[in-house]
Image (cartoon, rainbow, N blue to C red):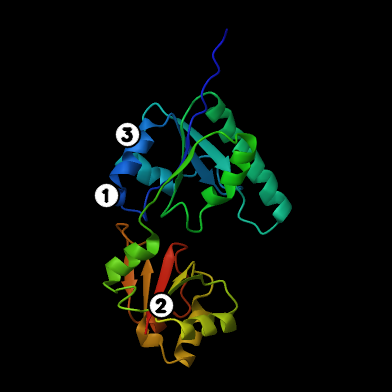
Amino acid sequence: MTESVKNGALYGVGVGPGDPELMTLKAVRVLEGSAVIAVPKSAGAAPDAASRALSIASKGAELKGKEILRLLLPMTKDAARLKEARQTAASAIAGRLEKGLDVSFITLGDPMLYSTFSYLVPFVRKLLPDAPVRVIPGVTSFSAAAASAIIPLAESGGKVAIIPAAYDIEDLRERIAANDTVVLMKVNRAMDALIGLLCSMGLEKNAVFVSRASWPDEEVVTDIKSLKGASPDYFSTVIIKK
C-alpha cells in the first residue's frame, strides 16, 4: 500500500521594508527550510525583472538550490482578471504543497498588511483545506519610516490611522482631522494634491516624507512643500503627526 504524501506548509513571510538586516530570525529560518520560494510579480513586467522582495530575501537568507516560483499577479481593479490570476497562482502553489514541499510566499513589509498573500490564502485553502498555512510577520515600511524620521507613531492614548493616499481628498481630510497620527502609504501619485490639502489644514509643518525607508538610497524630507511637482518613488510614505 502506497502511503499518501503529507501536504507541505504554506508560509507568508514578511521580509521587511528593504534592509536585509531587518528580516527576523524566524523569517530566515523558514525561508532556508522551504523548498519553494513564491515571488509575486506584476503582470506585464519583464520576465527577468528583479523582485525587490526576492533581492532582500536572497541577501538575508541562503536560497541556493530552491525553486523560485514566480507568480504573475496584475495590479488592476478588474475583479475577473484578479480572480483568474489568483486562482492560477493558488493552483501553482497547491501543486507544490501536494508534493509535500513547503512554500514560502515572500512579501515586502508584513504579509497581513496590503499584501497579495492575504488574497491568495482563501484560494489555496479551497484547493487544499488541510494544508497548514502560517504567517511570519515582518517589519512594515511605515515602522521603518518612523524610525528613520525619529517620529513616534503613538504616545499615550493617541489615535493612529494607516491609509492608502489614493483616497478621495475630502475623505482624507476627515481622517486626518480625526486622528493624532496619520500614515499615508503609496503617496507617489497624489503628492501635489496631498501637499495642497496639508497646507489648507495648516499641517504642512507636521508632515514628514520618507522614500525607500531603510534602503541605501533612503530619503527623508521635512519640508513637504519642496516636493510640489516632484515624482516620488512608489515606495514613499508621508507621516503626519499633530
Q: Which quarter of the picture shows residue 139?
A: bottom left
Left or right: where 203 falls relative to 79: left
Label 2 to label 3: alpha-carbon separation: 40 Å
Residue pointed to by mark 2 = 159
The three-letter code of the residue at mark 1 reads Glu
Residue pointed to by mark 1 = 21
Q: Is residue 234 above or below residue 56?
A: below
Image quarter of the C terminus: bottom left
x and y percentages locating residue 73 in the rendered image: 60, 47
Q: Give neighbour class at mark 2: few <14, some 14-19, many 20+ (Cα, 10 Å).
A: few
Q: Which mark is residue 62?
A: 3
Image quarter of the N terminus: top right
Q: Earlier in the sequence, mark 2 or mark 1?
A: 1
Q: Of helix, strand and loop, which one carries label 2?
A: loop
x and y percentages locating residue 160 in the rendered image: 41, 74
Residue 206 visible, this angle: yes
Q: Of helix, strand and loop, which one carries label 3?
A: loop
